[in-house]
Image (spheres, rainbow, N blue to C red):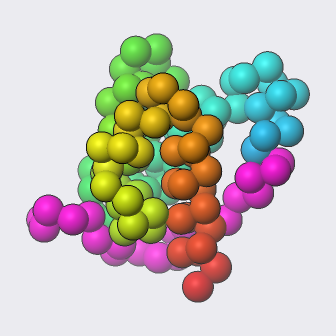
Amino acid sequence: MSDTPQVTNPSAFSTGSLGMQVVLTVITFGLYPVYWTYKTAKMLDEGTDQSLSPILAIIPFANIIVLWQISEAAEPMTEKDPMPVFLLFLFFGVISWYWVQSGINSFASQ
């Protein structure tokens, strides 16, 4: 395995509406991001050469591990270093969420 994650299955990625994700976050009183984290980790696990643990997304405190895995695995799509993406997930998740989802959207629409 190389240092930089590689996309191995482009068909595993699907687009998601950022606006609808915000609406769902409000409607579910903030629970939608847990589902988004699980769904995104599963998508990246299937579509890249990285081994992610999507189930950790629903376990409090263990979800930090999956946020790091998402930050690393999304590097080919976001074209951003994983460390700032991860740190923003921890302290201001909206920016990381936007970067990762926008990267997946642009990759899936190709």
Q: Is residue 62 above or below residue 3?
A: above
* Viewport quadrant of the C terminus: bottom right
Residue 105 left/right relative to 65: right
The residue under the point 60% across, 29% down is 34
User: Exactly how many numbered labels are in the figure?
Assistant: 0
Q: Position of residue 50 (x, y in %)?
A: 27, 56
The residue under the point 36% across, 44% down is 84
Q: Is residue 9 magenta?
A: yes
Q: Position of residue 91 (x, y in %)?
A: 48, 26
Q: Position of residue 10 (x, y in %)?
A: 47, 76
Q: Is residue 50 above or below residue 48?
A: above
* Viewport quadrant of the N terminus: bottom left
Residue 8 left/right relative to 63: left
Q: Is residue 14 above or below residue 62?
A: below
In front of the other: 58 or 94: 94
Magenta segment, prevailing SS (helix, strand or loop): loop
Q: Which residues are magenta?
A: 1-20
Q: Residue furthest top?
A: 60
Q: Position of residue 52 (x, y in %)?
A: 33, 45
Q: Is residue 64 above or below residue 20?
A: above
Residue 8 left/right relative to 98: left
The residue under the point 52% across, 44% down is 96
In front of the other: 109 or 90: 90
In front of the other: 3 or 79: 79
Say which quarter of the image contains residue 93: top right
Q: Is residue 11 magenta?
A: yes
